[in-house]
Amino acid sequence: MKKENEINRRDFVGKAAASLAGFMIVPRFVLGGQKPDGSRYLAPSDMITLGFIGTGKQGKGLADGFLNTGETKIVALSEVYKAKSQMALDRIKATYAKNTQLGGMPEIQVCNDYRELLARKDVDAVVIATPDHWHAAMSVKAAEAGKDIYCEKPLSLTVKEGRAMVNAARKHNRVFQTGSMQRSWPEFRHAAELIRNGYIGEVKSIKVSVGPPPVAYNLNAEPIPDGLDWSKWLGPNEPVAFNSELAPPITRDVFPNWRNYREFGGGMVTDWGAHMFDIVQWSLDMDNSGPVEVFAPDGKEHKFLTYRYENGITMTHEKWDWSNAILFTGTEGEIRVQRKKIETTPASLKDKIIGEKEKHVYKSENHHKDFLQAMRTRSKPICDVEVGHRTATVCNIGNIAYRLNRSLQWNPKKEEFKNDKEANALLGRPLNKEWGVKI
């Protein structure tokens, strides 16, 4: 018969071994440390928590992008269309199930009033993927709530709303990334560095090929579908009749057409222009400024909407051989660039290596990770709110010139038109008391 202390010792060793085995099978991402490739696992305490405002087609892609970084967890969704919030929730669940390295799926709150999401102390940042007419109000309120912000492009529906977003971010010391992700793509970075280093000589003209400006809302009324809170979808706007082109059902996997109507968006001038005019601003080192004149097309001297910068460079909103693309023409060559494609004259510039001592722009290879890194270091990301605002301003003053059908002088320092009350009145818009903010 074994002594009692031997039995206790055996029992202890067995329990310890079982405990050690249990410890050893804990997933590595729970413990932190370094992966075999040198990158870090993040312990749960180091993960950045996100709240998503807007879970439609664009929000779906953003959720995938942020989860794939392995640095975030989504803890709240705000959506005014129940079918879309459920679709987003199901998709997030599937992502966690498929990618076990992300850890267990957190409890996710779903609400149709984004203010409930902002009230949560555990939300580090918000991702705003709503129609443009909501961007300013939500961003300002998010900054006031102490949240960092990733807001989709175009940043703002009006110039004054954009400036209000900048002011709120600065006042509350928020990190703010505009979703102009082309700045994190190599072909656009290469174009910007070629131009800044003078490889096509002095830039003379730029053609930006994007679609048309917006029109006034003119769609017929349709029944509001079940599960859509139409008053919250409208938010700070004046009431209009519902039409499914503005908020299509989930059975139509399309980008909604609210962007074509000036009450909600700026047409393709802002929708695609916020990408392409943005790369022009970056390439010309104009991120804190902009053009000084915009000429409406007159069929004579100005066949197309034309911008002029103070240094004499002109830029036209003009269709050419490529769609959603830019053509830079200089004294010594040309650059043609669109997504995943760049061509140059001379052809050798396409593969030109920019030297270490030459001019370089901010380098980001992942727009989402860049935002998260800026949050951790409390620095400005590649497309800071001021950058997004200045690009949106280029688009918005172009739309004003189209709307008034005349040429305008713009002061980028004062952010107003010179001696033009009618044009200046279009720099902002009324926002209702319940959902609006001061602009």
Image (cartoon, helix red, strand yellow):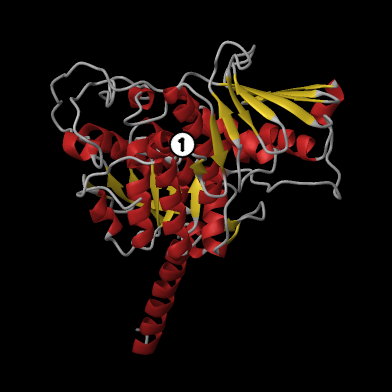
Percent position of residue 16, x then y: 43, 74
Say whether residue 287 is visible.
yes
Residue that sits furthest to the front in the current view = 419
Q: What's the residue at 71%, 31% (across, down)?
A: 313
Percent position of residue 64, x then y: 44, 39
Q: Which of 203 and 351 is in front in this view?
A: 203
The correct choice, above or below, for 246 with respect to 68 in the image is above
Tell me where residue 391 sits by quadrant: top right
Percent position of residue 59, x then y: 38, 37
For the N terminus, the image quarter is: bottom left
The correct choice, above or below, for 148 with respect to 299 in the image is below
Q: Nearer the viewer, residue 94 or 420?
A: 420
Percent position of residue 29, x then y: 49, 57
Residue type at mark 1 is: Asp
Q: Nearer the viewer, residue 58 or 22?
A: 58
Residue on which the image places disc 1: 420
Q: What's the residue at 29%, 46% (across, down)?
A: 77
